[in-house]
Amino acid sequence: MKTVRILPLFALTALALAACSPKAQNEVAEAANAVEADANATTAEAVSDTDAALGAAESRIDKAGDVLGNKADRVADKTGAALKDLGNEIQE
């Protein structure tokens, strides 16, 4: 987050030093490159963390779906058996 706040400051600094010596211009360019590299690394880490969190959530949702599916199957089996028993009693 700090990187995002610093980027406009570096852009302003780069504009202010544009008329300066080549050495100053090189230093500004190196600083801008360092900020860019830091921003890219931070973004990559955020993407990785988000992917990990979404993967964990997906796994939990899959497990919950499996549990619900198993319970629904058991209820269906019991309901089918109860209806069969009821049909047999009605026929008698």
Image (cartoon, grey):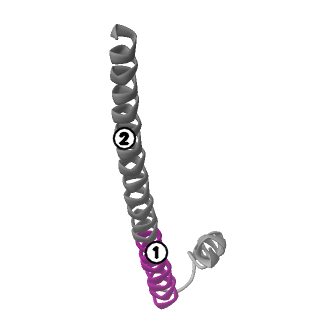
Q: Residue 72's quadrant in the figure?
A: top left
Q: Depth check: 37 or 41 in front?
A: 41
Q: Depth check: 84 or 68 in front?
A: 84
Label 2 sits on a secondary structure element that is helix
Q: Position of residue 18 (x, y in %)?
A: 56, 75
Instruction: Give the farthest residue toward the front.
Output: 92
Indicate whether residue 1 is drawn in magenta: no
Label of residue 74 in the image = 2
Q: Residue at x 34, y 26 (%)?
A: 80
Q: Depth check: 51 or 70 in front?
A: 70
Q: Amino acid at mark 2?
A: Arg
Q: Is residue 63 above or below residue 44?
A: above
Residue 73 in the figure: left or right of residue 12: left
**Dividing the image into 4 quarters, which one contains the C terminus?**
top left
The rendered magenta stretch, by its main secondary structure, is classed as helix
Q: Residue at x 40, y 51 (%)?
A: 67
Q: Residue at x 38, y 56 (%)?
A: 63
Kindly check if marks 1 and 2 are in contact, taking CB atoms under 8 A apart as contact: no
Task: Tell me if mark 2 has few (under 14), some (14-19) or many (20+) residues whose alpha carbon lies within 10 angstroms of its own.
Answer: few
Label 1 sits on a secondary structure element that is helix
Highlighted magenta segment, given as a residue range: 23-46
Looking at the image, is mark 1 or mark 2 nearer the viewer? 2
Q: Residue 54's quadrant in the figure?
A: bottom left
Distance CA(mark 1)–CA(mark 2): 57 Å
Q: Which residue is mark 1?
A: 36
**Dividing the image into 4 quarters, which one contains the N terminus?**
bottom right
Q: Position of residue 42 (x, y in %)?
A: 48, 75
Numbered disc total:
2
Q: Residue at x 47, y 70 (%)?
A: 46
Q: Residue 17's quadrant in the figure?
A: bottom right
Q: Earlier in the sequence, mark 1 or mark 2?
A: 1
Q: Position of residue 25 (x, y in %)?
A: 49, 82
